[in-house]
Amino acid sequence: MYVAAFITDKPGAAQARDETRPAFLEYLGSHPAHPNVVVHHGGPTLADDGESIVGRLIVMEAPSVAAARAFLADSPFAKADVFAECHVHAWDWMTGRPR
């Protein structure tokens, strides 16, 4: 199933996010503890100024919403306490979907 995660960072988490970002990006591509999760798209969401990072959107394929939540909970950002909120939902990918 496809899953979309809408994540908001904690206020004041910029330093932890910046320090952990390389590990987080590596984790998105290589996560042996979650072999059934495939990250298709992802990137930071921005404040109204178009520059300040406020969170991220991640689109993945996972066997279940619970598996996607576990994947995110094991991420370097989660372990560094960067996430304020993490909403994960099954997603019906209608346009731009790889075939």
Image (cartoon, rainbow, N blue to C red):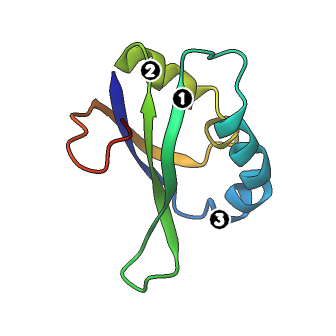
Disc 3 versus disc 2: nearer the observer: 2
* Badge 3 vs badge 2, beta-carbon distance below 8 Å: no
* Residue indicated by mark 2: 62
* Residue indicated by mark 3: 14
Give the image location of residue 20, x and y in percent: 76, 51
- Which of the marked residues, 3 or 2, is nearer the chain's N terminus? 3
Say which quadrant the N terminus sits in.
top left
Please, what secondary structure does the residue beneath circle 3 have? helix
Crowd rating for badge 3 (residues with CA inside 10 Å; few <14, some 14–19, many 20+): some
Looking at this view, name the residue that lies furthest to the bottom: 49
Residue drawn 37% across the image and 15% down it: 64
Mark 3–mark 2 distance (CA, rounded to whole Å): 28 Å
Q: Which mark is residue 80?
A: none
Say which quadrant the C terminus sits in.
top left
Q: Where is 1 relative to 7, above or below?
A: above
Q: Where is 14 relative to 50, above or below?
A: above
* Residue indicated by mark 1: 38
Q: Quadrant of residue 98?
A: top left
Mark 3–mark 1 distance (CA, rounded to whole Å): 26 Å
Give the image location of residue 3, x and y in percent: 35, 31
- Which of the marked residues, 2 or 1, is nearer the chain's N terminus? 1
Please, what secondary structure does the residue beneath circle 1 have? strand
Residue closest to the eye, 95 or 2: 95
* Badge 2 vs badge 1, beta-carbon distance below 8 Å: yes
* Badge 3 vs badge 1, beta-carbon distance below 8 Å: no
Residue drawn 70% across the image and 25% down it: 31
Q: Where is 34 relative to 2, above or below?
A: above
Crowd rating for badge 1 (residues with CA inside 10 Å; few <14, some 14–19, many 20+): some
